Amino acid sequence: MTERPAVIVLAAGKGSRFLGADHKLAQSLGALTVLGSTLQRAIASQLPVVVVTTERLAELARSSVAARDVIVLPEVGSPGHIGLGMGHSISIGVAARPDAGGWLILPGDMPQVQAGTLQAVAQQLSHHPVVYAQYKGRRGHPVGFSAELYSELVTLSGDEGARRLIARYPALGLEVDDPGAVLDVDTLADLDAVRRAGTASPPSALRR
């Protein structure tokens, strides 16, 4: 039996555009943090969740998921650690769940993505090699990759991410009624907008 797709939450970036006193993923959203809210919604999808992060945020991640599902990388830009970046984070996360029925890539700074959106993208991976959520025609996250792309995903490196795979393989843009699929927290203004939108509301699962 094929395992369910796994959600790979990327939380190892420096967040250099965010000018707050602390890392953007550690900023509060009601009773949670940005990363905590993202993880809460990922867990609510009932899919396996792996977090790729750094020591700075590892304890925050472990407060939501089991320690075995938190992969700690050196900080991007650390001396002697060439090749780190989004691509490397994806490859490490995918390699941690080699038997998954695909992988959903979800940035840790997207706390409004609904559980139902994750489930909907996961369900399409048995029919398409690449699936991404889109809202009102705008491409967003998660971006899902089927199990057949494992060998290519685990060789990613640097900060390129998976753009070349999306360009190489037929990709399905799955329209979802979820503005959170296109809302990330890059700046203080983004954080204020998310707070106003009430991000800390309970995550919703897919309605059947």
Image (tube, rainbow, N blue to C red):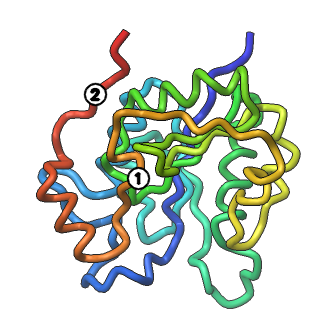
Q: Closer to the camera, 11 or 74?
A: 11
| Image side of residue 125 versus residue 64, left or right | right
CA distance for labels 2 and 1: 17 Å
Quarter of the image for residue 131 reads top right
Q: Which residue is mark 2?
A: 204
| Image side of residue 32 versus residue 70, left or right | left
Which tag, 2 or 1, sits closer to the chain's start? 1
Quarter of the figure that contains the N terminus: top right
Residue 10 position, x and y percent, is 53, 57
Q: Which residue shows up at 71% across the image and 59% down it?
A: 163
Rate crowding at label 2 as few (under 14), some (14 to 19) or many (20 or more) other CA atoms within 10 Å: some
Q: Which mark is residue 128?
A: none
Rate crowding at label 1 as few (under 14), some (14 to 19) or many (20 or more) other CA atoms within 10 Å: some
Q: Which residue shows up at 42% across the image and 27% down it?
A: 45
| Image side of residue 69 versus residue 176, left or right | right
Residue 190 position, x and y percent, is 27, 68
Q: Closer to the camera, 116 or 167?
A: 167
Residue situated furthest front in the rendering: 137
Q: Closer to the camera, 186 or 151?
A: 186
Q: Closer to the camera, 66 or 201?
A: 201
Q: Amino acid at mark 2?
A: Ser
Residue 106 position, x and y percent, is 51, 49
Q: Check disc 1 and report its element: helix, strand or loop.
A: helix
Q: Which residue shows up at 20% across the image and 34% down it?
A: 202
Q: Amino acid at mark 1?
A: Val
Quarter of the image for residue 147 reads top right
Quarter of the figure that contains the C terminus: top left
Q: Which residue is mark 1?
A: 182
Q: For marks 2 and 1, give the one nearer the viewer.
A: 1
Q: Check disc 2 and report its element: helix, strand or loop.
A: loop
